[in-house]
Image: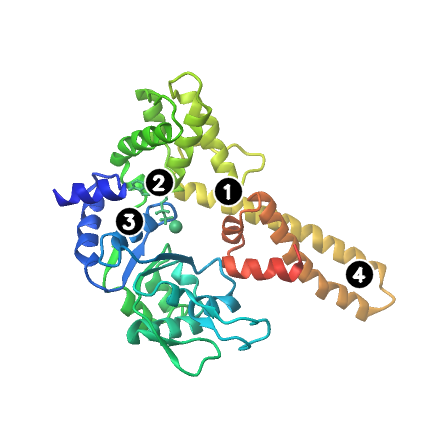
Amino acid sequence: MIIEEFKKRFGIIGKAKEIRDLIDISIQVAASDISVLIYGESGTGKEIFANAIHAYSKRADKQFLSINCGAIPEGILESELFGHKKGSFTGAVESRKGYFEIADEGTLFLDEIAEMPLTTQVKLLRAIETNEFLKIGAETVTKVDVRIIAATNKDLQHEVEMNRFREDLYFRLKAVTLSIPPLRKRKGDLEELAHYFISNYAAENKIETPILPKDALDYLMSYDWPGNVRELKNTIESAVALNKTGVLDVQSFIPLIRSNNSDHLQRNLPIYVNKSAEELDRELLYRALFEIKKDIMELKDMVYQQHVDVTDNENDGKKDEFMSLQQIEKEAIQKALKQTNGNKRNASKLLKISERTLYRKIKEYDL
Ligand SMILES: Nc1ncnc2c1ncn2[C@@H]1O[C@H](COP(=O)(O)OP(=O)(O)O)[C@@H](O)[C@H]1O
Ligand SMILES: [Mg+2]
């Protein structure tokens, strides 16, 4: 059966109807050059599907290039995508091929497409529609044949309504849409995934495959896996790596699941594993907001104190207050980075700014 073949070939696990339907669509669209849009939370398998579509297409022997649009600074993204000619801007000491050219005849996977700046979106749409683009600083177009697969965890329709995403590009991309459900909505697949990750990891590391008793599986089932399949995989691999007895009991998972949570943000309060992802997210956000609020209060006090200290000159007082806004921002960023152990993606979520803005600010404040 073709679905089973596809699963085996690309290491995709899942009996859930949604997964089977997704594979069905992937098989159908793989043969064409049509753009594909993949929705799903982080860790649900967007990239594994994008890669499978590429590998199942006639482009299989050419490049599959994966680009995270959120992680590349705004000013650089365009030259990364389309390349530039020597001398086209300060610092362009050599001509450089962009991803479009490198992925010629292959597939370009644009992850976190919602983070792409509007001006770059215009150029992307034109490149998709005409199969040609202008390198920065070039006078003649470069022709390419690239298939686009885009992915996001944001609601693009909403982004369009908020004028953060171009409607024409959205329409172009959404013709074929795959929505991968979060793991908590297809827990029926968890057991097979767990066994798959256990035996793979054991085989790769040439160790005996440990047993997963029922109560340990139940424990894994009771958790909501906000980080989805990626989190499950990491948790299982750590458990197998640390295991000495050949039995992955409940105890071997408890510290792993707890500490994964504290990766997001954890201070004094324990986080309970049976909370839903939404509850957990809300709690983490509240806690972050509380911390930031506390900082702001402290800073306000500091500024006020300085203001009192310099009452002989009113302008100086105002200047201090103005400076303190930047200081607050800087401190909030430092705090968020600290609480997320330097994980910029999580920190940007806490701060409710895009990852790229965070990168810019880190640079700006020299953090
Ligand atoms: N259905 C699945 N079967 C097996 N492994 C999966 C499945 N979905 C995701 N994974 C694994 O989980 C990890 C995260 O998947 P990925 O495709 O990178 O997620 P995303 O791009 O949505 O963040 C990868 O190691 C991937 O191989
Ligand atoms: Mg990904």
Res 307 label: 4
Q: Earlier in the sequence, mark 1 or mark 4?
A: 1
- What residue did someone put label 2 on? 229
Residue placed at 52% from the left, 46% from the top?
Answer: 286
The disc label shown at residue 180, or none: 3
Q: Is mark 2 within 8 Å of ligand 1?
A: yes
- Label 3: element kind: loop
Left or right of residue 117: residue 307: right
Badge 1 amino acid: His
Amino acid marked by disc 3 = Ile
Q: Position of residue 21 (x, y in %)?
A: 18, 48
Q: Measuring 32% from the left and 48% from the top, which residue is drawn there?
A: 48
Mark carried by residue 144 = none
Nearest to viewer (mark 4 / mark 3): 3
Give percent across and percent down for residue 35: 27, 64
Q: Residue 280, located in which quarter of the rendered image? A: top left
C-alpha gap between disc 4 and disc 2: 52 Å
Disc 2, SS: helix
